[in-house]
Image (cartoon, rainbow, N blue to C red):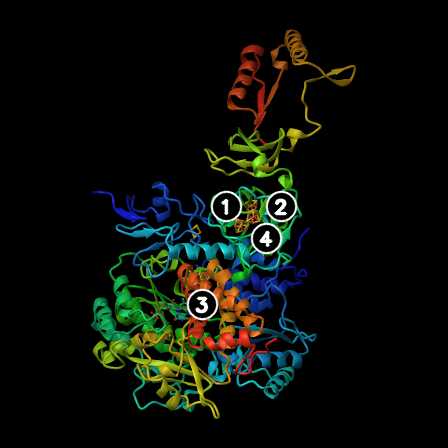
Amino acid sequence: MAEPTLTLNGRTVAFQPGQTILEVAQGAGVYIPTLCYMKDTLPTGSCRVCVVEVEGARTLLPACATQAAANQVIQTESPRVAAARRMVLELALASGNHNCLICEANGECELQALAYRYQVPTPAFAAPPDTPYYFEDNNSMIVRDFSKCIMCGRCVRGCTERQVNDAIAIGYRGSHNKIVAKADKTYIESDCVFCGECVQSCPVGALLDKNAIGQGRSWERTTVRTVCPYCGVGCQLEVHVKDDRILKVTGADAVPNEGRLCVKGRFGWHFVHHPDRLTTPLLRKNGELTPVSWDEALDYVAARLTEIKAKYGPGQIGGWCSARITNEENYLMQKFMRAVLGTNHVDHCARL
Amino acid sequence: MITCSCAATPPAQLTPAQWEKIDAIIAKYKDVPGNLMPVLQEVQEAIGYLPPEVQDRLAEGLNIPGSHIFGVMSFYSMYTWRPKGKYVIRFCESPPCHVLGAENLLQMAQEELGIGLNQTTPDGLFTLETSACLGVCEVAPAMQINEVVHGHLTRERFRQIIADYRAGMAPDYTTLTCTTYEISRYKQPPTDLVLLKNVGKIDPENIDDYLAAGGWQALKKAVTTMTPEQVVEEVKTSGIRGRGGAGFPAGLKWSFTRPLTVTPKYIICNADEGEPGTIKDRYIMEGDPQKILEGMAIAGYAVGASQGYIYVRGEYYLSKHRLAKAIEQARARGFLGKNLFGTDFSFDIEVRSGFGCYICGEETALIESIEGKRGYPRMKPPFPGVSGLWGKPTIVNNVETLASVPAIIEKGGAWYKSLGTPDTTGTKIYQIIGHVATPQIVEVPAGITLRELIDTYGGGMRPGSTFKFCQTGGASAGIVTAAALDTPLDFGSLAQVGGALGSGTMLVADQSVCVVDFVRAVAKFFAHESCGQCTPCREGTPLILRTVNRICRGQGTLEDLALLERLGAAMIDASFCPLGQTAPAPFLSAYKNFRQEFEDHITKKVCAAGVCRLG
Ligand SMILES: Cc1cc2nc3c(=O)[nH]c(=O)nc-3n(C[C@H](O)[C@H](O)[C@H](O)COP(=O)(O)O)c2cc1C
Ligand code: SF4
Ligand code: SF4
Ligand code: SF4
Ligand code: SF4
Ligand code: FES
């Protein structure tokens, strides 16, 4: 059977049944803005910035949550769409205190990008800048600044659908709506496990990685793709770096983690720049740990192992390696212990 | 640093006996699907409030995340996580009470009690709150104290009521015959009653009365002499359009669900009755509850459902009480339960309660609420008839719709169709409220005119009063002027003149009403009741309110009017559900009909009705 088609801005486009209008448009290279839409989670169709005009429909329809149907005639930027979209953006901007000057999200904020694209300034009806909003800064990892929250609900879907932590939900009603942890307490008093998925899900500057605040604008940072040094899952990381210093870590959209991380991978990187971190081998000389070269250290270890093996036998030597090295390295370690030293005494700490 | 702590509460000091009660409620509902709402309601009833410690216990006992529990609780107006007074006073501030002076009375109540809004008297007796429409508009201005309604409020009456409560004379709602007036007080129509036939004539708490009046015979006829398809066909023939507001043909709706092979299917009776000015379903629930059960059972037989739910708004305590009693008696007599009339048709019904939330009258939000969630409307399609409660085919019908069904089966669809107008067949319960001499409900064949409704059943305008406008169908519908007085009150005709039949309520306003101030009261309602799911309505409804408020205070500009028009257009186009899509309608139609009045507030700083304090 021929693929069904629809008309998108006057163009005939084929689609797969089950696709949303947004997916069809993305496939056809037609831009439709989104805010609440988040890949791999159920569309809620709630922000309404993606509305499009579908011939025969009484109202505009959200592209992210409306199924494509055969022979639909869709306009993505008609005057009617533009007017509604503009008002949605104005309302979102007016709902908080969007002063981009000192906002962490500046430069990577999805709301700012849309305001720019559609040339929508903060409207005159916005609440005055001194309007109080909920602000939470009582833990070492995440800051919640709801003067920037646009109630897209992405953090909640990140927490419940992607991480299945169920630590947060949408609370209250109407314009009082607010993202809440249990009993509307702070994250640290709640079921939150500080995986930071919500921070990564937030399209604006409402949920912040505390360590990075004020440390560098998005365009001043470079990202380094690497593997999480902690457990055997091997999550893919983006390490955000400025002047050779890590500012924050986010999950890379790749297997196995597809963007997700746990508290260690995301927030547990301070050892990298810690003054106590070992940067050279240390050898105890006259009872004092003294920095030495790798050559000196390896020569010493090789000499001592040979000596101990000769004197006491290989069964008196044990090896202990780490879950934070790769499988290949662990393989080599046991090979070395068994084949070179001739002992079965090898183990590693699978727990961190 | 934490800038606000909205839920900060002192640690609860519950006694072991209270914890035992809580655990017993958890145990009772542990395996009931969608148990969160009933559990929260019963625990609040038992303990008085739902502090964080209790939320934790429920989270553990019901295996529901604590975040979800708070998210649900905080969505509904009637839950509280802070202790309140023994008596919670809910003052209605919706348009029907507003036009009868509710705002001044609220001020008066604060003076009388010596407390502000949302505060509790030092003796712990009274907490004063406001509420959206309580559904008792025939006695406006009104308040509800716990389960009991007190209407026609004046300072003297309020003082007396408070004194009575202080003296320990709080009425027991289960002993009242009805919440407001007995129907016999009202002017009766010359035509035959279908829906209200038994109301006020039979004892609603005694199934024998209903049986003596021919009750449960229609179900018997349906299940023993008709196929389900024939029942659907009969309802189709009747032409009955849903009475919940949208007017969708009930038979057609059933015919979509009937052939689906998915099981189980559900029947939901929508008894949320939250549309301001709407009071009709309450009379049926309080006066003839068995009829609703019978209608639901017939619907169940027609579409192949075996379980029904009645979702009653939280404030309707007497309705819930009567329905629960009726279900118990119907079960005991074998009209509900397994193998009815010796056939293999089984059907049972459960009452579920809302808890202060207008949007839960919207059918998909209602379904979410029964499932124990926040009342967020769902995307349609799929429609509930295909995928509703727990994803199963679900028929949602209004109380009045379902209560019409037994008569349709008994006397035939053709008979029903012969009543009313071709557009809106059958009889309809109209509600005439506001500035008429005798606000009341009346059941007549659909299609009487607004003039006849006002003059004959409303007793004319109240003394010294002239008609200014009428808000038709509820808060979300348009305003019509005297030009519409001779329009038949049916779905089609009213839509043509910029009104809507909606729930059949007609709120009449006289010359004392300032249309801008009226729009402000409507805007307040929507800002209070928006669910907040989508941006246009969540942010738009309070923006309408703020802007109209400014105009009422003499600080408006002509740009404000332009903004309201632009905002209204975007809300109509881009809101998620009909609430946001219709919330701007009252302003837009008022502005269309009374443009001068709006502009006078702005340019001349004049409120012709003398209601607004400008500048
Ligand atoms: C905001 C909103 C509130 C509603 N409130 C009610 C209500 O209180 N009672 C009701 O029966 N229908 C209400 N409805 C209509 C229902 O969604 C639904 O159409 C109706 O229950 C279907 O029953 P019917 O076809 O018998 O009218 C409401 C709709 C909306 C959009
Ligand atoms: S959240 Fe976005 S729009 Fe708001 S202030 Fe920050 S950068 Fe600007
Ligand atoms: S940090 Fe993780 S667990 Fe905590 S609220 Fe965010 S997503 Fe949920
Ligand atoms: S905190 Fe961020 S992700 Fe969560 S609702 Fe607000 S804007 Fe959306
Ligand atoms: S239109 Fe209003 S009530 Fe409807 S979903 Fe949007 S916010 Fe909720
Ligand atoms: S992206 Fe579609 S409604 Fe938000």
Residue, disc 3: B583
Residue type highlighted by circle 1: Ala
- Tally of marks: 4
Residue type highlighted by circle 2: Ile
Is residue A201 depicted above or below B212 in this figure?
Answer: above
Is residue A108 depicted above or below A326 in this figure?
Answer: below
Q: What residue is drawn where x is 31% and y is 77%?
A: B493
Label 3 crowd bin: few (<14), some (14–19), many (20+), radius 10 Å:
many
Chain of the residue that carries numbered disc 3 in the rendered image:
B
> Disc 2 versus disc 1: distance between alpha carbons?
16 Å
Contact, mark 4 vs mark 1 (Cβ under 8 Å) = no
Q: Position of residue B151 (x, y in %)?
A: 53, 84
> Disc 4 versus disc 2: distance between alpha carbons?
15 Å
Query: Along the line of sight, which residue is nearer the eye, B247 or B434?
Result: B434
Q: Is mark 3 within 8 Å of ligand 5?
A: yes
Callouts 4 and 2 in the same chain: yes
Please say whether residue B294 is visible from this viewpoint.
no
Which is in the foreground here, disc 3 or disc 2? 2
Query: Along the line of sight, which residue is nearer the eye, B294 or B595?
Result: B595
> Disc 4 versus disc 3: distance between alpha carbons?
26 Å
In which quadrant of the rendered view does residue B200 lie? bottom left
